[in-house]
Image (spheres, rainbow, N blue to C red):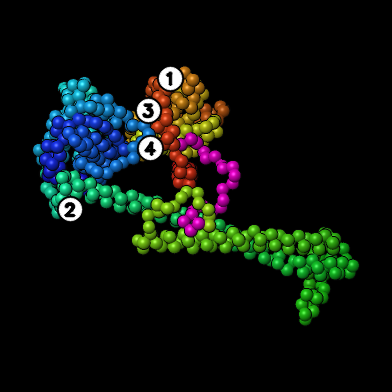
Amino acid sequence: MALSSAVLQQVVDEIAPVLQGGWMQKIEQPSAYTLLFHVRVPGRTHRLLINCEPKTVRLHLTGSRFPNPPFPPPFCQSLRAHLLGAKIEAITQVPNDRIVTFTCASRHGRRTIVCELTGKHSDVLILNEEGHILNRLFHRRGLIGQPYTPPPKPQHGSPPTATDPICLSNEGDFPISSALDRYYAQVEEARSRQQAQEARLRVLKEAIKKERRRLDAWRDDLYRATKYRDYARYGELIKANLSTIKKGADHVTVIDYFDERLPSLTIPLNPTKSPSANMADYFAKYRKYLAAEQALRPRIEQAERNLTQYQEELAAIQQGTWPHPSSIQPGTHPASPLSLTHRPQPEKKRRRAFRRFISFDGLPIFVGRNAQENEQLTFSLAQGHDLWLHARGVRGSHVLVRLKKDADVPPETLCDAAMLALLYSDLKKSGRGEVIYTKRKWIRKATGRPPGSVHIEREQALYVRLDQRRVERLRHHALVDEAAEDQRHASLTRQGKER
């Protein structure tokens, strides 16, 4: 639930008298949507939270603590450069609108933080003394350096309702902020639980499907092997009658002394083989049955136990009794009731296709390791609307950014992908160079050339310098969830083949 303008006005009325005159002591960006300002006032430090996530847009003081990334995101670095140590002179709200401004005096002159808490298009901007945009949380092309223009006001105001979280509490030094803090903590916890539950549900359904396929295959193998169950008896009976069996016979009728009634038993023979060879065949097939029993019975029993456990957990999710999986550890043993691993991993783990990274904007980036992977990445995995990059004029990896159809690549993601194209090319030694990029649909395979060779149309270029901080951030956020990413890769590959 986003805050109404009326509730936001109450928040501003509550925090402005306390924070005005305070100093920006510390600035953090725990996530892509969240900013945290530590404001020092005489005798106390307050933490001001600004969240621009569409479903939980808000601004208030918070007592919560948030984990921070090892390297500050670019916008956080910009905030620190312009505002660290700045004094807050005024906090105001645009009347009947969800826009709050913080006017600050910094060593660079007056700076203004504009918080557009308008739901889907929320943003935070830094303005200079002339009101020009220096930077913004969510980059939009052509706006940096331009005079700031507020978004159009809504046609109707947003009056407070009975569902506003402000109604939940009226206690403490900052009752409104405290109520909002508690309310959104519950919202985010519930959302986290829901996301974990949905993710687990998908994994369990896939695991059940896979376990059933494996069970069907093993049961079929065992069923086919059971027809050899009596072949040891046949071999012994042939052995006892070797001297009476003529070469080239296609059957032999013997007394079955394994049955107390001593009936006659006809045993088929291969006329192209000798009686001894027929006997050896029967013994060999009986050993095959024993080996199948020894190998398949434990697997079937374990798979049946796993399937029961998965189905019980699936039922718990569907009935709403499933606990949050905080105790689930990745890579647990197959015997664990919460494990989705079907068999122990071999000592040498199979290397996944492509290097995989997450951009600053949360988009997946794939990087080929060699010519074969470059070929597979570009012509099997990629879709026409994905972004393709390569270092100009040198050997290097194909780089692919996964994009939604008709979506533009965010500037930070473009910089991340270009940095990877530079890093995994022959330009790495010089630490600088030109990276070309275009949509995958403008790439054609070069016929008669080695794998990975392409013809490019409608290319654009970006000059890149090696930025170690960006590289470290990308490596830190490399995709490491093996099972989830293997599943995603298989899905993406299927989509590519379906095209």
Q: Horizontal placement of 160 versus 271: left or right?
A: left
Q: Give the residue type at disc 3.
A: Cys
Can residue 444 be seen in this snapshot?
no
- Residue at 24 percent across and 43 percent down: it is 63
Sooner in the amino-acid sequence: mark 4 or mark 1: 4
Looking at the image, do the residues carrying marks 4 and 3 touch, with CB atoms under 8 Å apart? no
The residue indicated by pointer 4 is 363
Q: Main secondary structure of the magenta part?
A: loop
Real-space Cα separation, disc 3 to disc 1, in angstroms: 13 Å
Q: Give the residue type at disc 4.
A: Leu
Q: Give the residue type at disc 1.
A: Arg
- Residue at 48 percent across and 35 percent down: it is 355
The residue indicated by pointer 2 is 168
Q: Which residues are magenta?
A: 336-358
Quarter placement of the C terminus: top left
Real-space Cα separation, disc 4 to disc 3, in angstroms: 12 Å
Residue 351, numbered label: none
The residue indicated by pointer 1 is 432
Sooner in the amino-acid sequence: mark 2 or mark 4: 2
Sooner in the amino-acid sequence: mark 4 or mark 3: 4
The residue indicated by pointer 3 is 415
Q: Position of residue 318 (x, y in %)?
A: 37, 61
